[in-house]
């Protein structure tokens, strides 16, 4: 489609109305003499309403508007890993080289390095028939085998020429008998989900090594989760842990509208994180999208689409991808601002009426799928939500809860008590429990699901008893209920608390989680029997094996430490008169 030129008719912040062009919805246009990038979001007769991805200060009516005839697309190919982009896939290190720390308006740079050469190894030969999505070869990018695929929109055909050697992303590496020329890269519109062959049931868990996630509220590969919480409650550290330890091959981290200092922490901390799988920097399998709160509001709205499109691209190679969106609240605020400038009818708390639909469109792009080339890949989306004042009844949190299947609720009171991760075990839930039960029974232990249920019931009972304790004190409770409080406390302090900065405790494998929980429950059973034999509650609480059990999670040789703690536990209760 040829470029058309019109002119600016009206300006309202990042929303510009233009005349003289005839674009389609979501086409990219260039605004003013500085050619600021924008996207058509509304068409009224001969007027086109455009949201501009950059600051519009100083532009005026009458300046030119050029319609490109193309939607907003991202470049997909080798060179994305380790890269830091803004919301519209401009590489920030490249922009920083051009003009320093502050991005000037109208400046752009391609998402990929078009000068760098990559060593391409074909996996197909002349005469082979290929179809859309099929792998034709690979490029080694960091430790990841970057698989080059036929673009999803291709009609396919028979290979007439395929080359091996070093090429830039623009070089033709394969030619089909239809005349189609394939490069190492292709482009894809960010608002269009990439196609796949079949969606699979979410019956395999994403193992995170975090006890409260895996042990209590598991998420499936290709699933969706939300981490809402007030300021300072640990959303970012939780997402760091998920990015570092979850058993996916790649991580896409979208910092959507977060404060500059928080995004700076992410940009400085992520390169320092060591990937436990390879011993190299975690950035080697990460794509960062940084969009701070002082960046243009429209680009914030676009950043989550850019992130999920990149995640889907790696999924189509047959990889598991974790997408961290921090935070979807800022994305929703960007939608609210654009909506008010468009003079649309506001919904609850001023958010647009289509807030729920947009959130759904984003989260629905998660999934474990059979790709077009018969590989299995997944995109797991974990979105942080920042409700004002920690109020979970506000529209973004409530609409997110209707969509996602896992809710990890961060609690400011737990954070103040230095209980980390400060996930509230009473308000959190996972709707994947039943479908993942078979996997845990087969791969961890047949008793895993039952033990999880018993531990949750114990903590629920503790919460009920705490209300009585606050009125009359714990000493007025029967000894059996005092014991319930003590065992629940062990579950909280030994199992649910986890030190993200400890070399050993930072990651807890599933078998260790099961054994730790089993040991706590065994202590509870022995304590109950001792109580029935008239042992004093103070004697049970003071048992040295209780402290030994708590220390086992920090021991490198966990099995030996746990066996010693269990032996000590048996000795302690024998002293209380149990044989």
Image: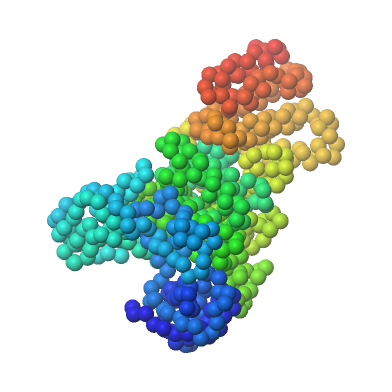
If the image is split into quadrants, where does the C terminus sit?
A: top right
- How far across and how far down the image is residue 237, in percent? 59, 44
Q: Examine the rendered structure and indicate whether residue 74 appears above or below residue 69.
A: above
**Residue 423 occupies quadrant:** top right
Q: Nearer the viewer, residue 274 or 309?
A: 274
Q: Residue at point 53% right, 34% down? A: 507
In the image, what residue occupies the spot 22% across and 57% down?
Answer: 173
Image colouring: rainbow
Q: Which residue does the image show at 38% across and 48% down from the upper left?
A: 319
Spot occupied by residue 518 in the image (x, y as percentages of width and height): 57, 27
Q: Nearer the viewer, residue 132 or 48?
A: 48
Residue 456 placed where, x, y %?
63, 38
Rendering quarter of residue 2: bottom left
Would you place residue 451 above or below residue 75 in this image? Answer: above
In the rendered view, does 230 fall on the left or right side of 320?
A: right
> In which quadrant of the rendered image does the N terminus lie?
bottom left
Q: Residue at x 37, y 61 (%)?
A: 75
């Amino acid at each position: 489609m040829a470029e058309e030129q019109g002119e600016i008719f009206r300006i309202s912040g990042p929303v510009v109305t233009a005349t003289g062009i005839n674009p389609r919805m979501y086409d990219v246009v260039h605004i003013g003499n500085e050619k600021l990038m924008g996207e058509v979001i509304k068409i009224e007769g001969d007027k086109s309403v455009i949201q501009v991805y950059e600051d519009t200060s100083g532009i005026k009516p009458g300046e030119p508007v050029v319609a490109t005839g193309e939607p907003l697309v991202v470049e997909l190919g080798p060179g994305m890993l380790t890269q830091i982009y803004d919301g519209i896939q401009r590489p920030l290190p490249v922009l920083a080289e051009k003009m320093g720390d502050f991005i000037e308006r109208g400046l752009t740079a391609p998402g990929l390095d078009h000068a760098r050469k990559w060593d391409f190894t074909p996996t197909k030969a002349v005469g082979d028939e290929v179809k859309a999505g099929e792998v034709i070869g690979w490029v080694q990018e960091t430790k990841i085998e970057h698989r080059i695929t036929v673009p999803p929109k291709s009609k396919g055909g028979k290979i007439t020429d395929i080359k091996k050697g070093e090429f830039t992303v623009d070089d033709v590496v394969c030619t089909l008998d239809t005349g189609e020329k394939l490069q190492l890269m292709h482009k894809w519109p960010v608002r269009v989900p990439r196609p796949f062959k079949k969606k699979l049931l979410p019956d395999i868990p994403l193992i995170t090594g975090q006890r409260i996630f895996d042990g209590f509220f598991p998420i499936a590969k290709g699933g969706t989760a939300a981490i809402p919480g007030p300021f300072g409650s640990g959303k970012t550290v939780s997402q760091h842990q998920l990015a570092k330890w979850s058993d996916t091959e790649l991580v896409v981290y979208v910092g959507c509208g977060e404060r500059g200092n928080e995004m700076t922490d992410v940009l400085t901390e992520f390169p320092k994180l060591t990937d436990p799988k390879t011993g190299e920097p975690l950035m080697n399998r990460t794509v960062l999208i940084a969009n701070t709160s002082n960046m243009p509001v429209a680009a914030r709205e676009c950043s989550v689409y850019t992130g999920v499109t990149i995640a889907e691209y790696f999924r189509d190679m047959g990889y598991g991808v974790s997408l961290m969106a921090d935070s979807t609240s800022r994305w929703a605020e960007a939608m609210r601002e654009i909506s008010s400038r468009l003079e649309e009818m506001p919904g609850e708390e001023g958010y647009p009426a289509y807030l729920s639909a947009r959130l759904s469109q984003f989260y629905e792009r998660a999934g474990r799928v059979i790709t077009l080339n018969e590989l299995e890949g997944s995109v797991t989306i974990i979105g942080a939500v920042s409700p004002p004042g920690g109020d979970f009844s506000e529209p973004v949190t409530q609409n997110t809860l209707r969509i996602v299947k896992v809710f990890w609720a961060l609690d400011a009171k737990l954070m103040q008590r230095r209980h980390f991760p400060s996930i509230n075990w009473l308000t959190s839930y996972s709707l994947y429990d039943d479908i993942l039960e078979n996997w845990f029974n087969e791969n961890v232990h047949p008793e895993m699901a039952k033990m999880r249920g018993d531990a949750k019931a114990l903590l629920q009972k503790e919460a009920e008893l705490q209300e009585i304790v606050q009125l009359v004190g714990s000493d007025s409770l029967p000894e059996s209920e005092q014991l319930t409080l003590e065992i629940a406390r062990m579950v909280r302090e030994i199992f649910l608390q986890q030190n993200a900065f400890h070399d050993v405790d930072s990651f807890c494998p599933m078998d260790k989680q099961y054994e730790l929980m089993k040991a706590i429950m065994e202590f509870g059973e022995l304590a109950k029997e001792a109580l029935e034999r008239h042992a004093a509650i103070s004697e049970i609480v003071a048992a040295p094996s209780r402290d030994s059990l708590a220390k086992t999670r920090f021991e490198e040789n966990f099995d030996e430490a746990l066996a010693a703690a269990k032996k000590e536990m048996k000795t302690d209760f024998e002293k209380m008169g149990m044989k």
